[in-house]
Image (spheres, rainbow, N blue to C red):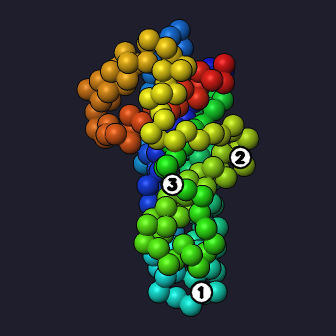
Amino acid sequence: MKACGIGIRVHSGWGAVVAVSADAGATQVIDRRHVEIIDRNLRGSAQPYHFAKSLELRVGEKHVADSAAASAQLALAAMRVIAEHLGTQDHGIVAAVIPLSSSRPLPGFAKILASHAMIHSAEGEFFRQAFREACVSLKIPVTGIRERDLDEQAKAVFGKEAALLKKRIAGLGKVLGPPWTTDEKSAALAALVALKNSS
C-alpha cells in the first residue's frame, strides 16, 4: 500500500480535505472534497458560539456540547469514507495535518461569549477539534501547523525545492479543475509536509 497524507483546512462548519501522495517524487492529488460537519437539523450548529451567546449560560454550554457531538460524528463518518476510498486506490493515510490559526489559547466559556473575536476563534477551534478527533479515532497520526508558519515549515522540510513545490501545487488547478482555491492549495502543501515528516 502506498503512503499518502491528508491536509484539512477548516472553516465554520466544513473543511477542505485534500489527500496527496509523492510516489517517486511526483506530487499527486488523489482525493479532494469539501466535507460539511454540521447537523442542519440542529438550530445554530453552523455557528454554535454565536448562537450560544443569545442563550442562558448553561443552556449555551449544552448547545455547544450537543453541536460538538454532532460535528464529531459527522467528521468521523466523512473521514472513514475518505480512508476507505483511498484504500480502494491502494493508498493508506500515514499522516494528517490541520492548518491552525495564530490565536491565543481560549479562556473559559463565559469569557469567550463576552468577546466577538474570541467567539470566532472558538468556532475555528471547535471545527478543527472535530476533524482532529476523527483522525485520532481512525488511528491516523494528526498534527497541526500554524497557517502563518506553513511556508517556513515547507522550507525546513523541502529546502530549496519548497518554492518549486508551491508553484507546482498552484498549477495543479489547471489539471484538476475547480475548486482549487487557497483552501485546497494550503491543505495540499500541509499534507505534503506531514507526509515528508512521517517518512
Q: Can residue 138 be seen in this view?
A: yes
User: Could you tell me the amino acid type at mark 1?
Assistant: Leu
Circle on res. 103: 3
Q: Where is residue 32 in the image (x, y as percent from the top left)?
A: 44, 38
Q: Is residue 88 visible?
A: no
- Which secondary structure lies at badge 3? loop
CA gap, disc 3 and disc 2: 23 Å
How packed mark 2 is, by other alpha carbons closer than 10 Å (few <14, some 14-19, many 20 or more), is: few
Please give the name of the residue rendered at 65% of the width and 40% of the height, measured from the top-left corner. 142
Q: Where is residue 49 in the image (x, y as percent from the top left)?
A: 51, 73
User: Could you tell me the amino acid type at mark 3?
Assistant: Ser
Please give the name of the residue rendered at 49% of the width and 14% of the height, measured from the top-left corner. 159
Among the two numbered marks 2 and 1 on one chain, the one whose residue lies closer to the N terminus: 1
Circle on res. 40: none
Q: Are marks 3 and 1 in contact (CB under 8 Å)?
A: no
- Image quarter (top left, top right, bottom left or bottom right) of the N terminus: top right
How packed mark 3 is, by other alpha carbons closer than 10 Å (few <14, some 14-19, many 20 or more), is: some
Q: Where is residue 187 in the image (x, y as percent from the top left)?
A: 46, 37
User: Could you tell me the amino acid type at mark 2?
Assistant: Val
Among the two numbered marks 3 and 1 on one chain, the one whose residue lies closer to the N terminus: 1
Left/right of residue 70 with respect to residue 37 in the rendered view: right
Q: In this view, does 107 lie above or below 55?
A: above
Please give the name of the residue rendered at 44% of the width and 60% of the height, measured from the top-left corner. 12
Q: Residue furthest top?
A: 24
Q: Report the residue marked by disc 2.
A: 136
- Mark 3 or mark 1, which is nearer to you? 3
Q: Report the residue marked by disc 1.
A: 57
